[in-house]
Every structure is written in C-alpha cells, then in structure tokens.
Image: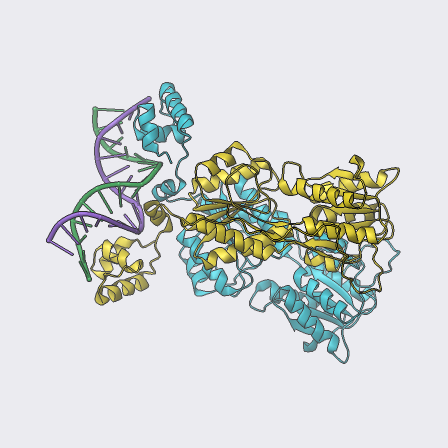
Chain colours: A cyan, B yellow, C purple, D green
Amino acid sequence: MASIKDVAAAAGLSVATVSRVLNDHPSVSADARTRVLAAVETLGYRPNAVARSLRTDQTRTLGLVISDVLNPYFTALARSVEEEARSLGYSVIIGNADERPDLQDHHVRTLLDRRIDGLLVSPTDGGSPLMLDAARAGTPMVFVDRWIPGVDVPVVRSDGRAAVRDLVAHLHGLGHRRLAIIAGPAATTTGRERVEAFREALGAYGLDLPAGYVGQGDFQTESGRRVTEGFLALPEPPEVVFAADNLMALGALDAIRARGMRVPDDIGLAAFDDIPWFVHTDPPVTAISQPTGELGRAAVRALVDRVEGRAGASVTLPARLVVRRSCGENPGAPASPVPRPPEPPSPVRRSTS
Amino acid sequence: MASIKDVAAAAGLSVATVSRVLNDHPSVSADARTRVLAAVETLGYRPNAVARSLRTDQTRTLGLVISDVLNPYFTALARSVEEEARSLGYSVIIGNADERPDLQDHHVRTLLDRRIDGLLVSPTDGGSPLMLDAARAGTPMVFVDRWIPGVDVPVVRSDGRAAVRDLVAHLHGLGHRRLAIIAGPAATTTGRERVEAFREALGAYGLDLPAGYVGQGDFQTESGRRVTEGFLALPEPPEVVFAADNLMALGALDAIRARGMRVPDDIGLAAFDDIPWFVHTDPPVTAISQPTGELGRAAVRALVDRVEGRAGASVTLPARLVVRRSCGENPGAPASPVPRPPEPPSPVRRSTS
DNA sequence: CTGAAAGCGCTTACAG
DNA sequence: CTGAAAGCGCTTACAG
C-alpha cells in the first residue's frame, strides 16, 4: 500500500508538503496542491489512520459499550449514535456487553487500549474498578440510559417515572389491583428505578408491591420466562405483569403461552421500551416508549463536547405510555387519554453536570 | 498515560526488555520479568495499541459491514461474529450500511484506512469500484449472507432454495394458488435468489409468478408496507404474500392491519428469516430460518484463515422452513411435516473457493 | 511557500 | 539475557 513517501516522490515534493495538502493547510501553492492531488489519484493513496492517530494523539473514534445487541432498544440507540457521530466526523466502535460485567470490562479495556477519543457506556453494573478508574483518569465519558451514581460523568437518559405512573393509572382504571414486576438487575440504575417508580405509583393508589410480586430478571429473555413461570405458579398470581424491558416481555409471552394461557384474558402484560413488533403481537402490547433516537444523538453531542474540550451536559428526556390491548382494555374503544395520576409528572430536566 | 519508557525507567531496564516481557518473548530473565510486571502494575500501564499496530502492521481487528443494524437477522449475525472473533483474539468494528451503497462504501473506506486485518461484508449492491478494488488489492475479505459474483472471495451463506420449495409445497397443500413475493433489491444476491427460488418452486406445481405479484422492496420495513398496499389494491389480490425478509414482513403486517384485514383469513403471510417475535405475532408467522449463529462463526473462521495466510473456505448451510399459522393452517392441528417438493433439496456444500 | 528533522509508542533484528 | 538503534507512517514546529 502506497505511503506518503511514495506520493511525495511521485509529486516531486517533500512529505511535509504532501501532508499539508492532505490536511488543507493554507500555506500550499496551487501548483503543489495539484501535483500532490494527481499523485494521490494515480497511486490510489489513502492516509494511514493508524500512523496519523499515533502522531496526533486522536483517533476520531468513539467507543460505545452497550448492554445487549440483541435488544432492539440498544440496537436503535446504536444506530442513532453512529449517525450523529458520523455527521460530526467520528467513527464508532461498538462493544456488546451481553449484560455481563466481565464482558463490559473487556470491551472498555480494548477500547481504551485503542485510544478512542471518548467512551459512551450503558453500564451493566454498579461500576467496576476499571470503569471507575477510566472516569477518574479523565477519559471523556458519557453514560447513556443507565449510569453509575457518584461518578462525575454526564448522563443522557430518559425519565420513566411519569410514564410508569400513567401505566399504573391505566391499570387501576381497568380494575387491576394485583400488579407484579419483572425487574432488571439491582446493580443497574434502570433496574432499580423502574421498580421504585412502580412501587411509588402503586402507593399513590394505596396498593402494595409484595416481595412475591417482584421477580428478579436480568433484562434478557430467559429471565422474563423464568420469573413469569414463578408468578403463574403462585397461589394468587398477579393480574398484570410489568416487564422492565422488551426482552423480558418476550420471555413472559413465552411462559404465558407455554401455560396455555391468554393475554389479556388470563393475565395482563405491559413492558418498558416500545418496539415495532409490539403493534403486531397477540395482543398488541402496552408499553412505555423512550425517545431513543434523540437519546443517542444527545449522548453523542455531550460526548463530543467533552472530547473537544467543551462542557457536555446531562440530558433527561421523558418517556411516554403507549396504551394497547395487552392489559385488557375494551377492545372496541379507541385508545383513550390516560387519566393523570395524583402527582404531576416531573418536568424535563436539562442539567449541566 | 504511562508509556513503555516510563515502565522501563521504573523497572530500571530498557524498553526492549519491557517489550519482550509484555510479548512473552522467551529470552527474559525471571528477575527482569518480575520487575517489569511490578512496574506495569504500579503505573497502571497499558500498551498503546495504535503504536503497536503501526509497528507490526496488524491491528487484530476485523471489520464487519452489515446491511442494516435494525434488522434482527443482522444483529444476531453481528453478535456471533463478535463472539467468534473475540475467542480468536480479534476485535470487530461494525459498520451499518442501512441498505445504502454510499454508506457501505463510507464504512469500507474508513475500515481500510484504519488498516483492519480483514473485512466481512454483506454487500448491499452488486459491487462498487471501491469494493472491487479492495478485493483485488488482496485485502483479506469474506462475504456473508450476500455476495458479489465474479469476485474471488469466499462466501459464507445459507441456501434457502429447498426451504422455499418446502414453503410452496406447504402453501399449495393449503389450497393457495395466487402467491406473491416482496422481493429484495435486484442488485443483491439474496434479493434475486429468493425470487428465483420462489418462481422455480411455483413452476414445479404448474403455477405462474406474474409480474404484478412481484413487488420490489429494499429489505426495509417501509417498502414491505408499500408493496403490500399495492398487492391489496389489485383487482385480484394474492392469497399469500411471501416477504423476502423479516422487516418487510413487518411492513406487510402494518399494511394489512391498516386495511382492516386479518391474517390468515383475508390474506396469508410468510417470511424469509425467522425471529423470536414471530412466535408471538397475531398470528404466529411461518418463516424460513437460517442458521445465523453458525454462519457468523463460519464467516469469521474463514476470514481469520485468510488473514493468517491459510486458505479460507466458502460455506453454504441449509435454511429450513418453520410452519406456523400465518398461511392458514388448521389452527388445531399440530405442526405437521411438510410434504417434500418434486425435486430433492440441494445438499450442503462446503467448497473451497 | 517549502523542506529537513524530530518524535508519537511501540517491536525487532543486530551486537554483545 | 540485555540494550542501542532503526523504523513503522504520519504531523508539525522551526528555519529559510
């Protein structure tokens, strides 16, 4: 593969001049420019990004460590991250943690070794030493969706509390009282928050969330199946199951079907995260929808701000409830506006971290 | 960030010795080793992969350019690719072409600039000059799922012809005669092949595939919707629509629902690519399932073979039909074995390219 | 406007 | 077993 030396030789100029042409440096004569460009063309020369990175100490690459590529939510997030990054002149390298802290650390380490300019993480746990070190060492970093408390890193996420209250209002209005949740890992912020928001919303209606109605999942399909089987085996099973993400909802559907039961007749189902397939499932699934594309773009902007020496702000966007038929709504009725829960929803916050 | 010089200074040795320790070179004294390791530990030193790559001319990185990250098939493929690569000591950088040849070229170029050791591509078109050049220039390359004819590059894919024949036999047995297809882009091999296989299979039953029953899609949701609307507006709409991938099947479901029609009562639906959600759609969707994980692993093995100077073989694995209820099967009956079509299925081929 | 030279952080023959 | 030195392909003050 042709190097800058070959181009210089072909153009009859020094490598310094070739480099200046390639980098649009102002002080280059028109003549030199055309000769260099011609040589580049005939040799099919492409600058070696590795060498450039070593010299400039920047890779124009962002690392993205997502919790699970098989989760359509993260896939959509990854897509918008890549788009926004590309428009800002950055590439992105994706690492899939598969909800495993060890794999997450593997990817963070690899990304750091490659000297990416910045790191976008949706942490699968409460913060490994490696992650904490990276944050402290000053690696430009931003958390998306999930975050690690106590670390001085901007977080871009959506707040689902108001939507969870809307969901509980919807369920309560339908007459449901025994409500259960398939929770995500307690080591993750979203894992904890969704349970807490659910519990609080229930409390506003004087309802309890007994321990037996909180199933511990891991955001992946299999755990949704297992937890739901447990719920169904209870002497008094819940009337509705709320899955804290879409994959666990898939597992719940599997378990319900395996028991020969029907949604919503035998048991209701709702999910955090909306995906295109929920429109076509049997029945369509009531879900809480996040502004995923906007989250991805905001996260990249915050990270690039940090990379380029600007502040980089935290962003919180609201999620919203999308009512479908999986909790037993009157099938004929058009989707009605959900009655507001007792407390007002928290406003969108855009705070500088 | 600490460099190898800092480690050498801290250990009281030369950088050469430090490098040898780090690379497990045999001729290092036990004493030197322990001193280096201690220095590495206290400094928290991590080798700079960029510098190493420049020097060794290898990045231990594979590039993967997939057609569409929002397509669960490619997402599953990407996952198995990353797993296998990791187990062989390689990282993978994913580029999303979003079914756009220009974006595909952008990613190929970026990946080449970064001097990845090998390239895995599922081409979105018939071969841009860039792609052709890369293949000819000797960049280790392997095609997955889709390929470019006439280029000397191994291809790892699945052969759906037998499964398509099984599908047509299934539909014919159910009494359907007017069968339509939502095709992928003619510039892609899978786009062409699935139509051809469908047409051939119909021919074996004396059935025709009229031009009006071949809708041109692009493997993305919106095109499935548009094409299906066209089918439904026909004076004589088809009895069954076969979508050449899962996203176009999603679009078809959207269109059918928008018309207020029901599957399979008003129209049947089948899809190429099976995904977990097809079990829970209304009704469950009959689909052709590819051995996606195995394809990803085989592709990586072939590519790493090429990278490391071995041959690297093409692999073709069979796809299989999974019958569900979306084409109108007797709902009560257990999934029955599909009657064999006239011709025997082509055997699995493992040819060295 | 242009070029010679230093240097980014590594690895690896070559001597000893 | 160890070290001094060259060199991977670039960029960028520093001179001129």
Quarter-wise, where is residue B281 in the image? Answer: bottom right
From the viewer's perspective, is A105 left or right of D13?
Answer: right
The image shows residue A144, relative to residue A238, as above or below, that is: above
From the viewer's perspective, is D1 left or right of B137?
Answer: left
User: Where's residue A194, x and y in %?
Assistant: 65, 64
User: Of B39 and B148, which appears nearest the observer?
Assistant: B148
Q: Residue at point 42% right, 48% down? A: B307
Residue B123 visible in the picture: yes
Q: Residue at point 76% right, 47% down? A: B242
Quarter-wise, where is residue B35 in the image? Answer: bottom left
User: Where's residue A129, x and y in %?
Assistant: 43, 65
User: Of A268 and B83, which appears nearest the observer?
Assistant: B83
Quarter-wise, where is residue B22 in the image? Answer: bottom left
User: Where's residue B107, x and y in %?
Assistant: 52, 40
Q: Residue at point 71% right, 39% down? A: B217
User: Where's residue A174, x and y in %?
Assistant: 83, 65
User: Of A35 and B121, which appears nearest the observer?
Assistant: B121
The image shows residue A112, relative to residue A9, as above or below, that is: below
